[in-house]
């Protein structure tokens, strides 16, 4: 990885209290590509991805060292504003978490908090993001229905639409399909493959086939170390690290 | 099969069930007797003229107009003061205060304050509002005193309601670039509001029956006029009742029973609103 990426991560270490969960992680994440993060559970994938948009700031005894730059800006420098960072780097969580509001208001929320009041602009953003999230056809008649009445897969696509609506540059996915059935999962995977045209995508998954299907680059985490990071095809065919090979062939994890 | 631990456990279970049933029945029976007794004594007396007359020396001409109006004034003001104050304090403690020794101390104190006997609040109100602030024995002194009384309950309810909101909602909001304040105001508070309102109404329905603190600040027992401003003297339903109960004539005892019916009705209405809100709250939120 010689070329500059949107994210460059240097010697990242992270702790919850005294527990050291990420160790000396270096990674470069390329724009308009899908980067998958795999590894056994508890190895620090979620912690890592949540460092990228400062979501870990919300955890009281979390601490990190090292450097994460996004588009050349150190996102942990004192001048960096976590609010601005999270708007530019969106996130979709493991469990669909729509607000207990209408579909429309779920999506409009992100724009409203940045002062957009114009009804036409909101309508347009709602429609466009629902279309990009492949949900428009299913809900266009019921935009004012409560989002909690949607199925799990629809809720997750709504969460993706909600993230898209604020026009981010990067979308982080933390095991977005682990609570979904195979059909809903397939829809989300299709979607992710399409999203990389407009966005940089980072996805945590513990489903190896999913990583192989959707991603261009794959990082394999093991007990807080980034054991291997390479082009997806290489990771899944000729991994350099014995641990990676054992993991993807299902010998543990 | 008759002597094993299983059959013993079954026996204990049966005994416990019967004990609990008896306890419930005893409670219900006493309550019903009490209510029926009051209804028999006072229901015939509840009439439009009873509701719209001032107290009088002659029991058959006396009414509870000044007490009802006083109760409404005091409760209205109490709600006006205690709700915003309690909710803001609750939000601050739950969302903003740094978790440290000082916050812990404040929290423990608030929890304890909720259990302090109400007469103590009356004495506090007498010292601060009536004397020091020279508000006299006025509607506003009464309302401020009752505000102190229920503030700890509202603060605690607010915090509990905020705590009950799943963290995933906050995460979703922060991940879109919302600030803490936006997240609280637009996502957390609306969902927590039915819970907060329920708690506040229950607190108010406790305050509506309070007599001791208002007697302590010197609320009058005989008022033949309506308060025209918050600085006027007042009486409330429980005090009026208290006054009538202590009279020797039979007619006043009937009046007292009738006033109690009205007070019970008011409390019942408030509690129904609280139950309605809670019901809606539970129905709407299912993650
Ligand atoms: N909020 C937290 N407080 C303390 N420890 C945590 C917290 N979140 C995660 N951990 C610990 O950090 C390690 C890495 O967790 P995580 O990043 O969630 O792993 P993964 O997503 O790969 O399953 C685990 O051992 C987990 O128990
Ligand atoms: Mg995880």
Image (tube, coloured by chain):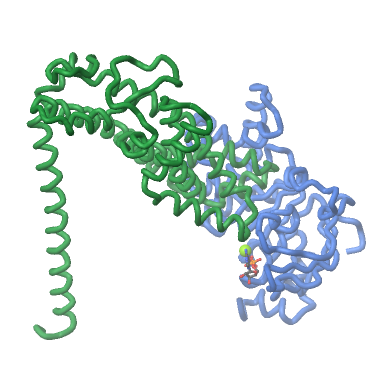
Chain colours: A blue, B green
> Is B261 or B6 nearer to us in this picture?
B261
**Horizontal and vertical percent position of residue B264:** 23, 33
Residue at position x 47%, y 46% in the image: B161
In the shown orientation, is residue A231 left or right of residue B103? right
Q: Is residue B110 left or right of residue B225?
A: right
Q: Residue at x 57, y 33 (%)?
A: A105
- Quick check: A69 above or below B285? below
Near-viewer residue (B167 or B80): B80
Residue B120: x and y in percent read 40, 45
Q: Percent position (x, y) of residue A89?
A: 74, 48
Q: Nearer the viewer, residue A44 or B124?
A: B124
Task: Using the rendered view, name the quadrant where residue A158 is placed.
Answer: top right
Residue B239 falls left or right of residue B199? left
Q: Residue furthest front?
A: B131
In this view, the residue in front, A105 or B169, is B169
Ligand 2, by image quadrant, is bottom right
Q: Is residue A176 left or right of residue B13?
A: right
């Amino acid at each position: 990885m010689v070329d500059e990426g949107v994210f460059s991560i240097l010697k990242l270490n992270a702790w919850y209290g005294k527990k050291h969960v990420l160790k000396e992680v270096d990674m470069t994440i390329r724009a308009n590509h899908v980067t998958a993060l795999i590894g056994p559970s508890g190895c620090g994938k979620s912690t890592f991805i949540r460092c990228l948009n400062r979501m870990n700031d919300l955890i009281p005894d979390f601490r990190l060292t090292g450097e994460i730059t996004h588009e050349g800006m150190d996102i942990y420098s004192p001048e960096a504003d976590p609010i601005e960072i999270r708007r530019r780097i969106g996130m979709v969580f493991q469990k669909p978490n729509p607000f207990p509001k209408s579909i429309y208001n779920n999506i409009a929320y992100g724009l409203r908090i940045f002062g957009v009041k114009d009804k036409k602009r909101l309508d347009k953003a709602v429609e466009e993001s629902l279309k990009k999230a492949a949900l428009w056809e299913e809900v266009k008649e019921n935009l004012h229905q409560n989002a909690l009445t949607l199925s799990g897969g629809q809720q997750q696509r709504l969460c993706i639409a909600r993230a898209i609506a604020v026009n981010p540059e990067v979308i982080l996915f933390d095991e977005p399909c682990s609570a979904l059935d195979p059909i809903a999962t397939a829809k989300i995977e299709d979607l992710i493959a399409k999203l990389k045209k407009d966005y940089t995508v980072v996805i945590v998954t513990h489903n190896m086939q999913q990583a192989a299907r959707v991603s261009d680059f794959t990082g394999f985490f093991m007990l807080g170390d980034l054991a291997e990071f390479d082009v997806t095809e290489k990771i899944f065919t000729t991994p350099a690290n014995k641990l990676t090979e054992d993991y993807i062939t299902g010998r543990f994890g | 099969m008759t002597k094993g631990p299983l059959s013993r456990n079954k026996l204990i279970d049966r005994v416990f069930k019967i004990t609990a049933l008896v306890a419930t029945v005893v409670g219900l029976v006493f309550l019903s007797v009490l209510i029926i007794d009051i209804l028999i004594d006072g229901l015939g007396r509840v009439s439009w003229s009873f509701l719209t007359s001032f107290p009088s020396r002659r029991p058959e001409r006396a009414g509870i107009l000044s007490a009802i109006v006083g109760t409404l004034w005091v409760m209205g003001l109490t709600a006006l003061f205690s709700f915003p104050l309690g909710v803001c304090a609750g939000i601050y403690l739950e969302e903003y205060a740094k978790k440290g020794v000082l916050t812990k101390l404040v929290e423990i104190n608030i929890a304890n304050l909720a259990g302090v006997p109400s007469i103590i609040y009356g004495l506090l109100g007498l010292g601060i509002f009536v004397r020091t602030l020279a508000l006299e024995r006025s509607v506003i002194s009464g309302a401020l005193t009752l505000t102190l009384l229920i503030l700890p309950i509202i603060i605690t309810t607010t915090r509990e309601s905020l705590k009950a909101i799943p963290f995933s909602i906050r995460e979703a909001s922060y991940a879109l670039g919302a600030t803490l304040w936006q997240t609280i105001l637009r996502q957390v508070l609306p969902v927590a509001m039915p819970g907060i309102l329920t708690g506040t109404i229950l607190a108010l329905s406790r305050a509506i029956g309070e007599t001791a603190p208002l007697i302590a600040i010197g609320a009058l027992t005989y008022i033949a006029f309506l308060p025209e401003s918050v600085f006027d003297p007042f009486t409330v339903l429980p005090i009026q009742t208290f006054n009538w109960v202590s009279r020797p004539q039979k007619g006043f005892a009937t009046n007292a029973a009738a006033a109690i019916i009205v007070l019970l009705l008011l409390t019942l209405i408030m509690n129904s609103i609280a139950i309605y809100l809670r019901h809606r709250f539970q129905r709407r939120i299912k993650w």
